[in-house]
Image (tube, rainbow, N blue to C red):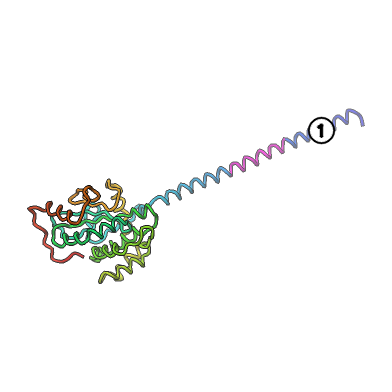
Amino acid sequence: MSQRNSDGKRSAREALQEQRAQDAARAKRKRTLVVAGGVVAVLGIAAVIGVAASGHHGSTTPQSGTPAAAPSGATGTDSLVIPVGAPDAPSTLTIYEDFRCPACDAFETQFTPTIHALEDSGQIKTEYHLVTLIDGNLGGSGSLNAANAAACAQDAGKFRAYHDVLYANQPDEQDDKFADKNTLLTLAGKVPGLKTATFTACVNNGTHDSWVQKSNDAFGNSGFNATPTILLNGKSIYGTNPALTPDSLQQMVTAANKGKQPAKVTATPS
């Protein structure tokens, strides 16, 4: 073989090897781009799913268009007040409370007899605003479910009695016992005539859940940030110095009602 032919063959082999090396390099770059593009796509999808999941988890507000079914006889702005006592009583006691709240239970234990006596003598009417702070702080649904059940009792004209039963049987704050609707229904058996098929369906179906959530949202926008919050004729009177007592509450109401006639109460409010 001549030197010329030998050089030609080496050149051809070298050219082929160079071409193959270039082809391999291009193929490697293509695979890298495909993998990188796939990772970006997966991360993008994950981000979208994460945002959607985060938005869903963080929202406790009913979906747009869900009606907030107010209980029978509810009054006030957006019908968010459950009233107890004669409507024309000369003074108004406003109570914001959460059925899971231990401080609310302490208030009720100390003040319930006095409040009932003032209601039943026509000196005050009480306006209840139901709140779900403990559900938000500790998790669970006991505040919501108990408030819905209390609203169902309002439908039956037995809010006051059932309200008192719930506080008399309030579990430990860490024990979300009121999340169990069977517990709420069992406690309803302590109120004569309350545990009917209609009440049971109202509790089990969460008929007033959206209304309770709306009430809690209104509390969040009220400027108050703790339960219980107690107002007499619009003025905060609980958690102040000197501390409120049943006697001082009675004295405050007497002073506020001076020169005014008490309402005529024909029957003890339920």
Residue furthest toward the right? 1
Judge whether 171 appears above or below 217 on screen: below
Judge whether 155 appears above or below 37 on screen: below
Q: Amino acid at mark 1?
A: Ala
What residue is disc 1 on? 12
Numbered disc 1: secondary structure? helix
Question: Overall secondary structure of the magenta stretch?
Answer: helix
Residue furthest toward the top? 4
Instruction: Look at the image and tell me in which quarter the N terminus lies.
Output: top right
Q: Which residues are magenta?
A: 22-38
Tell me residue 68's x, y (percent): 30, 56
- Is 133 in front, or is 29? 133
The residue depicted at 8 percent of the width and 57 percent of the height is: 261
The residue depicted at 22 percent of the width and 47 percent of the height is: 241
Judge whether 165 appears above or below 127 on screen: below
Residue furthest toward the front? 242
Tell me residue 219's x, y (percent): 29, 50
The residue depicted at 23 percent of the width and 63 percent of the height is: 160
Tell me residue 211's x, y (percent): 30, 56
